[in-house]
Image (cartoon, rainbow, N blue to C red):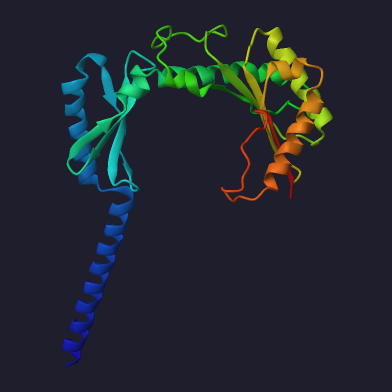
Amino acid sequence: MKKKGKLALRIIALLAAAALIGLILFVANAFVGNPISSYMAGKAMDKYVKEHYSDLNLEIGEVKYNFKFSEYWALAQSRTSMDTHFNIYYRNGKITWDDYEGSVLGKFNTLTRWEDEYSDYIKPVLSKIDGLEEHTSYVQIEKWEYEKANDNIRLDMKFDKQLPIDMSMTIRADLESDSLAEIAELLKQAHAALLAEKCVFVSYGLFSEANGTLIMIHSVTPADIESGKLEELLQAAREAKEEDAGKTADKESAQPDVQSKLSVYIKKS
């Protein structure tokens, strides 16, 4: 009887262990996929590239799993073109889609590369300004440039500050003060330094989160800076923002938005 009891306990332990392993595998499969499906996805992607993009000299990167959509994906990258790269997606045993048209033909890759290169260019320029020694400012191409067809933009086209496209720039730094007078002076200095380098932007922004104070400023135009009234414009925009925040959220009673594009938001914790 004792032997039978021990055998039963061993069987129960083995079943429990098997159930636990099964549960772990089930959870792992749900969140990171499984090696077999990953392998099959990679093989399908290789075949897909040969059939649809054989002239692009592509190589497939590591196959990854997106648990949110239960699909596998990988980056297809050209060996000869830095702007020719796009994602391929696999689900339920087949390739579902790729983003070649938007990323490559739509020039998304080229435009985002320019943003990165321009951001790198302005960093040493702005770091010479007091208060911006450790900034992480960045350049953004305006949304409409992504949406319109621009025949002047070519894949792998070298970045140039004089490119005929609209760009904005956001200063990102930990400011010691939320004084609008000091912020206005900082924007003036940044604008002057960038113009000296022939860097032209359609608008400026500023973001700071330091010393318990959040500062977000959007859409300051060169005309605002050069008007000689930047501090007053910032103050008016801040007051308008605070007034809007105090209004009811009821859609029926809300007033049409007649606020200037310039936006200033400052919050202290």
| Residue 63 in view in this figure | no
Instruction: Choose between 256 and 154: the one closer to the eye.
Output: 256
Which residue occupies the foreground of this view, 155 or 238?
238
Q: Position of residue 198 (x, y in %)?
A: 65, 7
**Which quarter of the rendering shows the N terminus?**
bottom left
Query: In the rendering, at what x and y percent does residue 23 appear?
Result: 28, 63
Look at 79% across and 36% down and name the residue there: 178
Q: Give the x, y percent position of residue 34.
A: 25, 48
Looking at the image, residue 165 lies above or below residue 187: above
Picture quadrant where residue 108 is located: top left
Q: Residue at x 31, y 23 (%)?
A: 100
Q: Position of residue 225 (x, y in %)?
A: 75, 18
Does residue 255 appear to the left or right of 78 in the view shown? right
Q: Residue furthest front?
A: 252
Q: Is residue 214 left or right of residue 24?
A: right
Horizontal side, residue 125 vs residue 48: left or right = right
Tell me: residue 214, above or below residue 106. below
Residue 235 shows in the view:
yes
